[in-house]
Image (spheres, coloured by chain):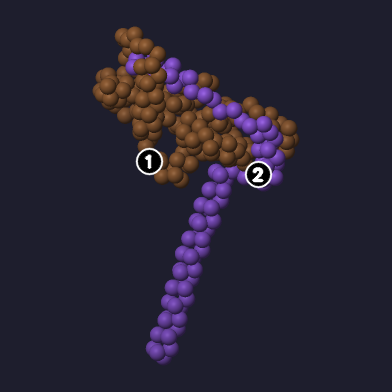
Amino acid sequence: MPFDEIDDALRQQPVWEPPAGFSRQVATIAMRLPAQSDHVTGATALTTAWHTVGGLVAGCRATVSGYTWMLRQYWALLAR
Amino acid sequence: MERCLAGDQAACETLVELYARLVGTVIWRAIGNIDVVEDLAQETFLRVFRGLAYFDRRSRLSTWVYTIAHRVAIDHLRAAGRWRFESFDASPDDERDRVEGLREPAVSAEDRVIRDEEVRRMHEALARLPDKYRLPLTYATIEGLDYPTIAAMLGATVGGVKTLVFRAKRMLRDALTNAV
């Protein structure tokens, strides 16, 4: 089958016709949705995750620092 | 678009009316199942309205809407386990893949029955093509979609899409030739 016949056959496929009231139905649903973007949602999730990781790291550092301080006090007591 | 963003429902209806036919056709051709087209077309427009405020106008609104329709179709194929990710990148192939060679000689004289049978087999062969080739060819034969729009939808270059379309046609022709 030559290329132009392949083209013709594919172009003869039917197109989709929206059912009556489709646009009204979609617009009505859309009006009820809060405006947001997948892009922004993704960015927000990434920021939240970043802050969570940052918080965990800061928490660990504080804990280690606390233990170090306690050990120093302990050794200082022993040294007296 | 501004009226739509301001919450004007009539403007949103107009936007849907403007693009619904092509959005539905893109989805139908991409997934091959008309039963879910209405739902997926609706999903497309809901994504459009959710993201409208962030549309950066670097491309035409129609291109952006059809790109979302394509992604909705891909999401559906992926959920159905019918999608294997492949880049729509036309990697270098042999010289025969050049788009200049798209013209095909020799149109044989076949009668109507043989022709119909050929068309039926062609659609079967098309359904078996890898999506990387099937989708560019499918979209390229939709009235109203030009190559720059298809390239934007697929995240490819215009030249790359033309090459993929050519290869898809060649695959189809070969499949039909081998089946005889």
Q: Which residue shows up at 47% across the image and 20% down it?
A: A11
Q: Which one is closest to the eye, mark 1 or mark 2? A: 1
Chain identifier, colour brown: B
Residue B176: image location, x then y, percent? 31, 23
Q: Are marks 1 and 2 in contact (CB under 8 Å)?
A: no
Asked if residue A78 can be seen in this view, the reply is yes
The C terminus of chain B, quarter of image: top left
Q: Residue at x 39, y 33 (%)?
A: B131
Secondary structure type for disc 1: loop
The hue of chain A in the figure is: purple
Image-based side of A58 in relation to B178, left or right: right
Residue B120, image x, y percentages: 39, 24
- Could you tell whether B92 is left or right of B76 in the image? left
Q: Is residue A3 above or below residue A44?
A: above
- In the picture of the structure, the residue carrying the numbered disc 1 is B84
What's the residue type where badge 1 is placed? Arg
Within 10 Å of the Cα at label 1, are there few (<14), some (14-19), or many (20+) other Cα atoms?
few
Query: Tag on residue A35?
Result: 2
In the image shown, does B164 or A76 lie closer to the viewer?
B164
For the residues labelled 1 and 2, the Cα–Cα distance comes to 32 Å
Q: Which mark is residue A1?
A: none
Q: Amino acid at mark 2?
A: Ala
Residue B24 in the image: above or below residue A32: above
Disc 1 chain ID: B
Residue drawn at 73 percent across, 32 percent down: B10
Using the rendered image, report if marks 1 and 2 lie on a common chain: no
Q: Secondary structure at mark 2?
A: loop
Indicate the quadrant where residue A76 lies: bottom left
Which residue sits at x=37%, y=11%? B111
Residue B3 place in picture, x, y as percent: 72, 32
**Quadrant in the picture for residue A28:** top right
